[in-house]
Image (cartoon, grey):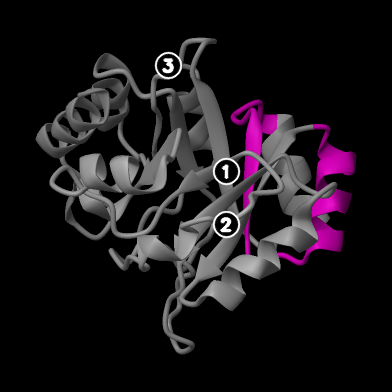
Amino acid sequence: MPVHTKICGLSTPETLDAALRHGASHVGFVFFPPSPRHLDFARAAQLAARVPSHVRRVGVFVDPDDALVEEAVASGTIDAVQLHKTAASRVAAIRARSGLESWAAVAVKTRADLDAARAFAGAADRILYDAKTPDDAKLPGGMGLRFDWALLDGFRHHLPWALSGGLDPANVGEAIARTGASLVDVSSGVESAPGVKDMDKIGAFLKATQS
């Protein structure tokens, strides 16, 4: 089966076009002001207009209120929502209210963290396993951290899932082989600086997932 790929935190036409040119199946737009990858809706709409219909546009949020999600939906920029630090009941409510495919991010450091994914069965459409960031970190992801992929050995997934956290062109092939992930998600691993995507790294990452 082909491995699907999401390039997250895109913010310029050039880097978005690089992701599309090299075969990304998903592109991510971040709506979280503390992030160096944050977009306003006007800028996101300009980027979203460049994305062909076969590529999914994912809006990334951190426990958003209804107004923020509704503004994103109304702007026509996204096909799915990716929700960090959001309780299962809230994910279900956002999914019902927006009518969009909903991903629930589960921050992983231990096997017990993986068990928390079970709460999202029936609430989300997909689980995104991401590395847990330090408690004092301002961002829930995009920090280049990875978790021990061995934690996924023998784990019974209750929903379709994706792998994130510390992936880059050098390790994504190993990550796919080790975990069997059919969708991988990268942000900082294809950057030259926080929030600054690198077109060559995007190309290398996508080539590595295809080989």
Magenta range is 75-99
Q: Which of the pair 70/174 is nearer the observer?
A: 174
Q: Earlier in the sequence, mark 3 or mark 2?
A: 3
* Rendering coords of residue 191 (x, y %): 19, 50
* Rendering coords of residue 96 (x, y %): 89, 41
Return the residue at label 2: 155
* Rendering coords of residue 34 (x, y %): 46, 68
Return the residue at label 1: 161
Q: Residues within 10 Å of mark 1 (few under 14, many from 20)?
A: many
Point out the residue furthest to the front here.
154
Q: Earlier in the sequence, mark 1 or mark 2?
A: 2
* Rendering coords of residue 51 (x, y %): 45, 17
Q: Looking at numbered disc 3 in the image, what kind of residue is underneath it?
A: Arg
Frontmost of labels 1 and 2 is 2
Q: Residues within 10 Å of mark 3 (few under 14, many from 20)?
A: few
Q: Secondary structure at mark 3?
A: loop
